[in-house]
Image: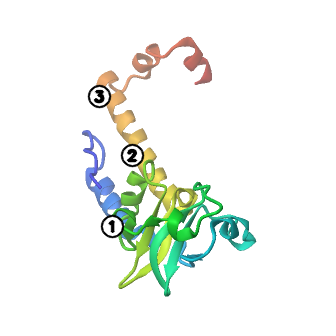
């Protein structure tokens, strides 16, 4: 994660040390689902679609001989096919380390719906966009928004000095009324 620069007047060391701590402390494993639901390479897609235990999952790791070889995505609508024919094969593009900084998944979540989470020696879980609603991501977002507010206040003070009248003159009547 690239930590943004901090304008004058802000406690740069506090912000940077906090962000480094969050980056080191908040890992992908903290939001990942580590109890994988899977389907078998030989299963029919129609059976996977209809299985009530799998109904809430949009991506399912696919097993062959107890090894994950790919991912079946619910958006594929090939009901008469076997999972093997409808799945996406495993590649490094869908893997992320369990110990990777949480921000690394946050950055790719807009273009990648999921990543398989690799532990010490094997795939241990999955992290998806829906996991972005979990508490560790909220903590990270809160820290970034708080920093943005501090930067904005610093810029306002630098441009307008300590005089409230100066910056208030720049607000629209509607914003003044809300204030």
Image location (x, y in percent) of residue 107:
38, 52
Q: Nearer the viewer, residue 143 or 23?
A: 23
Identity of the residue drawn at 25% across and 44% down: 5
Q: Is residue 64 left or right of residue 11?
A: right
Identity of the residue drawn at 32% across and 25% down: 161
| Figure check: 45 above or below 12 | below
Mark toward the viewer: 2 or 1: 1
Mark toward the viewer: 2 or 3: 2
Mark toward the viewer: 3 or 1: 1
Residue that carries the numbered disc 2 in the rendered image? 147
Image location (x, y in percent) of residue 40:
57, 78
Which quadrant would residue 60 be assigned to in this image? Answer: bottom right
Q: How is the image coloured?
A: rainbow
Q: CA distance from mark 2 to mark 3?
A: 16 Å
Residue that carries the numbered disc 3 in the rendered image? 158
| Figure check: 148 above or below 114 | above
Q: Residue furthest bottom?
A: 65
Image location (x, y in percent) of residue 173:
56, 12
The count of marks equals: 3
Residue that carries the numbered disc 1 in the rendered image? 92
Q: Is residue 66 left or right of residue 162?
A: right
Q: Which mark is residue 156?
A: none
Q: CA distance from mark 2 to mark 1?
A: 34 Å
SS of the residue under disc 2? helix
Query: First in sequence: mark 2 or mark 1?
Result: 1
Q: CA distance from mark 3 to mark 1?
A: 47 Å
């Amino acid at each position: 994660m690239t930590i943004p620069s901090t304008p004058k007047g802000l406690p740069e060391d506090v912000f940077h040390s906090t962000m480094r701590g969050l980056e080191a402390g908040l890992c992908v494993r903290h939001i990942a689902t580590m109890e994988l639901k899977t389907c078998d390479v030989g299963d029919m897609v129609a059976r996977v679609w209809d299985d009530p235990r799998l109904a809430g999952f949009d991506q399912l790791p696919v097993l062959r001989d107890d090894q994950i070889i790919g991912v079946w995505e619910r958006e594929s609508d090939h009901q008469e096919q076997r999972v093997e024919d409808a799945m996406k094969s495993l590649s490094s593009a869908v893997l992320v380390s369990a110990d990777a900084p949480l921000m690394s998944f946050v950055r790719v979540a807009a273009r990648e719906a999921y990543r398989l989470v690799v532990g010490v020696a094997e795939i241990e879980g999955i992290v998806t966009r829906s996991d972005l609603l979990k508490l560790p991501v909220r903590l990270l977002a809160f820290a970034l928004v708080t920093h943005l507010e501090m930067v904005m206040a610093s810029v306002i003070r630098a441009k307008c000095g300590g005089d409230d009248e100066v910056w208030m003159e720049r607000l629209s009547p509607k914003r003044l009324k809300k204030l």
